Amino acid sequence: MKNIKPRLKVKEQDPQKRNMNFLEVALGYSLEEAKEEALRCIDCKNPRCVQACPVRVKIPEFIKLLLEDALDEAFDKIYEDNILPSICGRVCPQESQCEGACILGIKSEPVNIGALERFVGDYGMEKNLAEASKQIENKIKVAVVGSGPAGLANAASLRKKGYDVTIYEALHDYGGVLKYGIPDFRLPKDIVTHEINNLEKMGVKFVKNAVIGKSITIDQLFEEGYESIFLGSGAGLPSGLGIPGENLSGVYFANEFLTRVNLMKARAVPDSLTPMKLGDNVAVVGGGNVAMDAARTAKRLGAKNVFILYRRDRESLPARFDEIHHAEEEGIDFRLLENPVELFGEDRVVKTVKVEAMKLGEPDSSGRRRPLPTGKYKTYPIDNIIISIGQKPNPILKDNTMGLETQPWGGIITDEYHMTSIPGVFAGGDVVTGAATVILAMGAGKDAAHHMDEYLQNKHNV
């Protein structure tokens, strides 16, 4: 590996310009740049990158096809396993999955698999290479609850096997967290819409404004002729801090904040029907990708001073390295080892956050060192605070579904085949694991589709 060139950096918008717009930050590779980076792949005999990918994309094979200028075939190779390459190329945590397993990373930098997948995915999108061929039909009806990454992957996999698939979405638009949770500067929404349209061309049906458990129940879906159901409704219920002042005006939960900005276009502009206006000083509590998205969005909405409050140190931040790096470039301040303990307001509007300095003790169950209180406090003036410390499944589904077993925190319990406690009802993604990544949710949806197919084939062969 002596002659391996350095990893080719992806061009980006200038930080001092991009923090004032919602255009995509990373600009992607050109064909020449993609081929230059692809040349760094050493085509391992036992590609660890494939094993580290939750949906098992055949990475060395698509890279080889890219180098041969067989771009149509490279797209087809990815699409065999991943129906959302343009999305995953942008938002997957490759550094802890495929790229983290790349053997080049031992003595150099791993191949930029994410950027190569994005390039091929965008090429396929531009050329409409995912145009559906004629599908087989087996006349068996299957329902999918949720149009996020788990639901989309599940629906695509089942549709390819010939099932009559209908996706039920609670919101007024499709895409789940891909639409409401991830800002345009990381994932342009027209890309998500394009992928949804591809599924419609495959024959997948979509129903919006359908809250399963309220609009229609699991039992009613079975009564309507669906023979199996996949629950991929995600984890959209935020966790609170549990501190005094949390109910003051000007306090937001990150998923509410991002949904209003991303899905409802609630930006502080004249043509917004539901404008989102922030003050000059905005605090964001949390250290994950959602916290980074919230902080960077607040900056773009005009907040002058945006800072992260996180109770552990920098090494413990769970967000992707790229997101932390981009946030810092854009002027986001990180105030580490600080934990909010109380919010104060005037006229019911938040004005001050009181934080306690923390120190790190022994590792906890997450493997990170446990934050411990020190009894030392300080205050910061704020106009808004955005809370991003985790999410869990909305209880509407479990509260209105007899016999559905769940974890104490709300996650649906499944067996090794992704089946829930109700025969014929499967589940996967964040509604089972809690908030995780797009690609892990897709992997769960895809795996569940395989077991749903086995279940239905056994049922019809009896």
Image (spheres, rainbow, N blue to C red):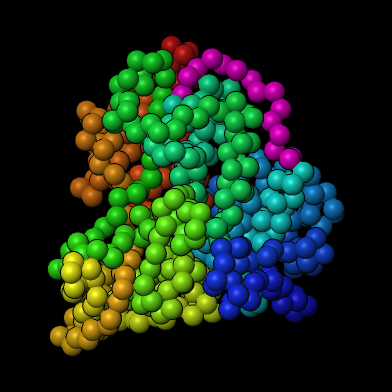
Residue at 69% over, 30% down: 132
Q: Quadrant of the N terminus?
A: bottom right
Q: Is residue 359 visible?
A: yes
When the figure is inspected, residue 449 is found, relative to residue 282, above or below; the finding is above
Percent x, y of residue 112: 66, 65
| Residue 271 on the magenta span | no
Which residue is found at the position 23% from the left and 50% from the top?
A: 409
Is residue 136 in the magenta section? yes
In the rendered structure, the answer to whether residue 211 lies left or right of residue 332 reads: left
Q: Quadrant of residue 31?
A: bottom right
Viewer-closest of 356 and 301:
301
Q: Which residues are magenta?
A: 128-142
Q: Is residue 62 left or right of residue 209?
A: right
Image quadrant where residue 14 sits: bottom right
Residue 145 seen: no
Which x, y percent locates residue 263?
Answer: 47, 49
Q: Residue at x 70, y 38 (%)?
A: 130
Location of the C terminus by quadrant is top left
Helix, strand or loop: magenta stretch: loop
Which residue is located at x 60 percent, y 17 percent?
137
Q: Nearer the viewer, residue 457 or 229?
A: 229
In the shown orientation, is residue 210 left or right of residue 140?
left
The extreme front residue here reads 270
Residue 330 is situated, as x and y percent measured from the top left of the image, at 52, 77
Q: Quadrant of residue 158?
A: top right
